[in-house]
Amino acid sequence: MTIKKLCTRGGILFCCCAIMQTALAQKSQVHKNATRASSSMQDTVRGVVRDDNGKPLTGVVIYAGTDKSYQTKADGTFAIPGGPNQVLTFDHRDFYTKQKQADVNMQVQLSRRFLRNIAGGKHDTARAISILHGEQSATTMLQSVGTAYTEQLTTTPASQFLQALPGRIAGLNIGFTSGGPALDGVGLSYNVRSALGANIILIDGVQRSFLSIDPEEIESVSVLRDALSTAMFGMRSSNGIISIITKKGDSGTPRISFSYQFGVESPLGLPKPLSAGQYALLYNEAQQNDAGTTTITPKYSAADIAAYNNGSDPYGHPNVDWYKTVLKNTSALKRYNFNLQGSGKGFRYFVDLDQMTETGLLKTIDSNSYNTNAQLDRYLLRTNLGVDITRTTQMQLNLFGRMEKNNQPGVGAGTPAQGSNGIFSALTTTPNNAYPVFNPDGSLGGTSLYGQNVNIYGQAVQRGYSFTNLRDMAVDLQVTQRLDDLLPGLYLKGQGSYNNSSNYTTTRAKDFAVFQYFPLTNSYTKIGATSAQTTAGAPGARSRVTYAEADLGYAHSFGKHHVSAVILTDQQSNMQFDTGNLPENYTDYAARVTYDWDQKYLLEASGSHSGYNWFAPQYRWANFGAVGAGWNIHKEAFIADNIKAISNLKLRGSYGRTGQANAGYYTYIQTYWNYSNTFNNDGYYFGTNGVTRSTGQSALAVVVAPEKAKKLNLGLDLGLWNNQFTLSAEYFKNRFYDLVGNPGKQTTLLGIGFPQTNKYTYDYWGSDLTAGWQSHIGNFNYFLNANFSFVQSKAVFLDEIPHTYSYQNLTGLPVGLRSGYIATGVFQSYAEINDPKTAVFASTPKSSLRPGDIRYLDRNGDGVINSDDIGPIGNGKPTIYYGITAGFSYKGFDVNVLFQGTQNHQAYLNGDFWYGFGNGGNNNAYEYNLNRWTPSQPSTTATRLWVGSNVNNTQTSSFWLRNADFIRLKNAEVGYTLPSVLTRKIGVPSLKLFTNGLNLVTWSELFKLRKDIDPESLYTGTSYPYPILRTINFGINAKF
């Protein structure tokens, strides 16, 4: 262990010990104060404890800062000796623990543990919902905001918090393109209501680029979906916002929480290559298919196939299961978490320390002194401190630090996270009979067909390794000054933030030789050479983000009139050092005004004057804004006095304009490329002398304006029987216009592209629905919650190149469709191929076609299949997203499950689906190839096999589209909280044992085809990423 590591870990340990010592000292002091007060005062604290519905609770254990405890009676009342100087803790296994300052006549309400799983907190009127630059209560909320709380996030064993969100919030769509240990954000895609670009992620109101956040430090995650909720963000408001609020300190004695988790990870599915004997049989069949009616000598003889099957010649006729050779069955995920929350006189604090290690699936060897497996080690530290500087001045200081180390094998050295992906690529494409793992003399096997460094086992353990160290540091300082003495409700707020991020990749790779063994002569041919391990370092992304904000706000009530307003200015500067670019600056002048009368009639307006420095001066500033109105119908007398079952009924709507900065780096300034003086580099020659030339990147400079969107949102919120049943339904219609894109009507005569313009227009519309039911039968608490999002789209204007036929147009159709041929099946006979009415490609005459090849529709009826027959095919994005959560708790046991899925989605299968024996006949083949077309087993959904290339069958066409709908048991948890009367005897007020899982079971048509194609990741065989993982996790949580 290096001195640097010792210092770093020692420093962290010292900080933790200091924090714990301070907290325990405070706790001891509070204990002493409470004891002295109890002994010197003969007062009695009395009160009653009720549940969410106002019913008295019996059996609530009350702790008064001493080892002695009390319980509520059958009517929920209690009486405790002592005065108001003590802090009481109310504990019940079926409710959230609450701490409260003692009072003479206390009224205490406890919330059931599953309350926040209902409707994402929308109808939990006791909680404020986070919005841009403030908070609002659910009662008066007009914005479209969906929220998930920490209790929901911590049930998912995942390395990145976004992995816990699919299926939990309507309108938020999250996909995964790969699994395994990876740096921050790798393998993730996410959007709000199918927005066109990346969503903004805010942490405590400041835009951040990192996703490695400990779920234990998160108080809530809110998705801001409509114009009213995002318009204040100006040039970054169109694509939706994910707003994360971290936990802060609160009143009460220090509370310590420690948890340990250990998870076992395994692939959801891996390809199933054919055995060497099966591969040889199908290869011979493919060869004969290509030859047509001419009989040929097969590549593999009967003796070869027998040797593959019986294993009599493991070196000359290998049958290697590469997946079992290179991969372990499982990998590990370990996590430790410590957090501390509480307050002292005039200050509040929250501290969270999290350490996580995730190992990869690759096997390693003990003879290496270094790690060649994929592995992620991460340390996170957050400290949030709130201080009352004076009676009217509050300061909030948030500190965050992150250290990550991502280790990878040396394959594809220098490209983080590509090492393991490169090995999975080789696993996918290498057949079992390619070469043996080892030769008789112990050397690595190989052949000239695959070249140097190709032995997959050698790639895993003998190519060295690389690792990337990532460091992040963020500081937020906010000061709020209340000016009630000047004007009641008036305040000033200032905020400054700094974030620095950097990473550095060290590569220590080497090459190795392989040897081709010839059994007949007992000789070897060396391929490549073994090299010494090299060391190289390369800095990666290095960035600095600064943010400043100044607010003037006002909130006051005049009888039944409630008014709030805020005006502010903010500026964010993003500096990317590794690109050499000048800073990217955003500046906003924003305001919001809200008004309600007796919480019945609601109005809100917000807007911003926003600037972005990469735009041309005439387009650098733009205005955005939104308005909203609502009506709390349940507060009207004709509802409140006559229909007691309705506890909440609100109509609301909003409309506004948002924007997005989609300008390149100062593209309004014409720039030029230089080409050197060779033909290959597009230089010019005068005689025999080469001359460097320069050319513009486009015919003119790219001068574009901000992209814009007009958004309409209509909503209904309903709560019945004191919000036991909740419903939130929204309809939205968003028009994105002035979108930047390449002009379709351009010519190649100039030899240079035309500049991009603001011409494209897309429409997105649909609905979000969230419904929930929560109740209890005695101490049996249960809930059921479902959310549903329906999204449709239309390309209103694309500036397409004029097409000969209308069916080729993409305008007017859903956004993102691919273009291709329409397949009408496969040829079943030569007679069908040679039919004069059969249209084929000019480049593939009928003599080259075989039964089992794809037949295409001649859409224009000209007798030839060509580009005139291409049109839109498939549906690239789902139109329906949904999630279902359910759970119960009883006498310390709690169970909850989450199902997630999509509908109306097609995946396009290409890559190794096209090339069963491609790459010159050296690629792999799989079990699904057993269902190929044959004369004795004719099929309309599978083709024949072939070797090498096949122009006819590898065209982009509807033949390769497959249903990608799925439903997945995304997450489940079972936990048991031991009775506190037992755990307190060992000094632990609360102790919970739990097990949970991620990606547990999946139902999908794609899985029937191939288990390694995950419908959520949208992998379709064109690349070979680390597989999506299933995780089974075990943990313990202790609270003090």
Image (spheres, rainbow, N blue to C red):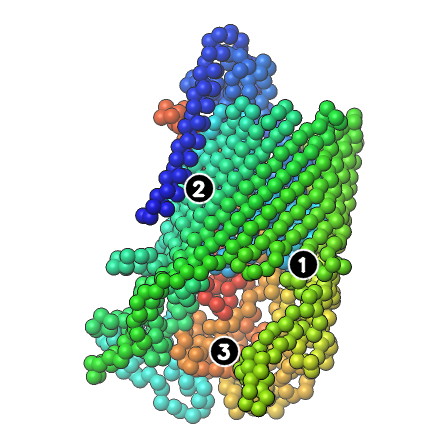
Q: Position of residue 1007 (x, y in %)?
A: 47, 62
Which quadrant: the C terminus? top left
Question: Residue 679 or 279: which is nearer the viewer?
Answer: 679
Query: Around disc 3, counting alpha carbons within 10 Å, would you say few (fewer than 14), some (14 to 19), or many (20 or more)?
Result: many
Location of residue 840 with respect to 774 vertically, above or below: below
Q: At label 3, which amino acid type do we have?
A: Thr
- Write down the quadrant of residue 243 in the picture: top right
Q: Which residue is mark 2?
A: 354
Q: At label 1, which amino acid type do we have?
A: Trp
The reply to whether residue 813 is visible in this rendering is: no
Location of residue 46 with respect to 830 vertically, above or below: above
Say whether marks 2 and 3 touch (CB < 8 Å).
no
Q: Earlier in the sequence, mark 1 or mark 3?
A: 1
Q: Position of residue 370 (x, y in %)?
A: 31, 57
Q: Earlier in the sequence, mark 1 or mark 2?
A: 2
Q: Earlier in the sequence, mark 2 or mark 3?
A: 2
Say whether marks 1 and 3 touch (CB < 8 Å).
no
Question: Residue 961 or 829: which is nearer the viewer?
Answer: 961
- Write down the quadrant of residue 605 in the picture: top right
Q: Which residue is mark 3?
A: 943
Q: Secondary structure at mark 2?
A: strand
Which residue lies at the image location 47% right of the left edge and 19% below the top edge?
A: 30
**How far separated are the C-alphas under marks 1 and 2?**
38 Å
Front position among marks 1 and 2: 1
Taking 717 as reference, is 914 left or right? left
